[in-house]
Amino acid sequence: MSNPALNTIPSDPRLTYEDYLELPDDGKRYEIIEGELHATPAPVPRHQQISRRIQYDLMTALEKKGLGQVFNAPIDVLFDNRNIVQPDLVYIPAEDSSIIGDKNIEGVPYLAVEILSQHSRRRDVLVKSRLNARFGVPFYWIVDPDIDRIEVFQLKDDSYEPVAVASSPQEFEPPGMDGVLLDLREIFEQANSESPRIEQSG
């Protein structure tokens, strides 16, 4: 005789996008990778300063020229029903704008940027890099605030190869991003020396 209780156990216990939508809005960053839930605390101020400065440079070089759109976390990138991630930054070229939906990015961005933290380092370097490669994200940046460095990876034959690395105080033109120039001294400048960018007029 069959056990009725067994009928209540899901045949596949991995989480889906529907489960993701039920997660609490508590300040943590939640991601589902291969059906498994990952959570990290809210980022520290310097992480956010670096993210904002990179976003500003990308928007100035790309978005303001109509070449595409730059988004910062929290933004959901839905690769499929069991892989939903929140990169620190993503760039979507204008020709791929159809993947930008009302609630998420449903598809593959041209660029994903992850800024390492104490809680995300292993996942960003190992797990999410493999995931981005598997779904075909052409460029993946790892930004390391501990050593003021950006490393650029390019998708080649279904895996990432390092194609460039630069550290503060260099100026850096990342491969695959025509017209983008990053002043790494300014991007990695410490919080206590931050000053706003002021547009001069007249």
Image: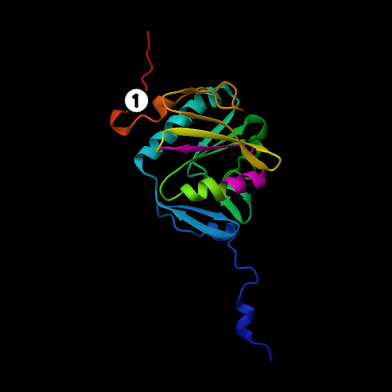
Q: Is residue 143 magenta?
A: yes
Residue 30 in the image: state x and y as whole percent.
48, 53
Q: Which residue is at a point 39% across and 45% down the rendered structure image?
A: 43
* Residue 148 visible, this orientation: yes
Q: Is residue 13 left or right of residue 185?
A: right
Looking at this view, is 76 or 165 the one in front?
165
Quarter that holds the N terminus: bottom right
**Could you say which is closer to the camera, residue 69 or residue 44?**
44
Q: Amino acid at mark 1?
A: Pro
Find residue 176 and report its horizontal and vertical position in percent.
62, 28
Quadrant into which the C terminus falls: top left
Q: Position of residue 149 (x, y in %)?
A: 46, 33
Label 1: how many Cα within 10 Å (few below 14, some 14–19, many 20+): few
Q: Which region shows up in magenta?
A: 129-145
**Please, which residue is most extreme toward the left here?**
192
Closest to the observer, 37 or 165: 165
State the residue at coordinates (61%, 76%): 9
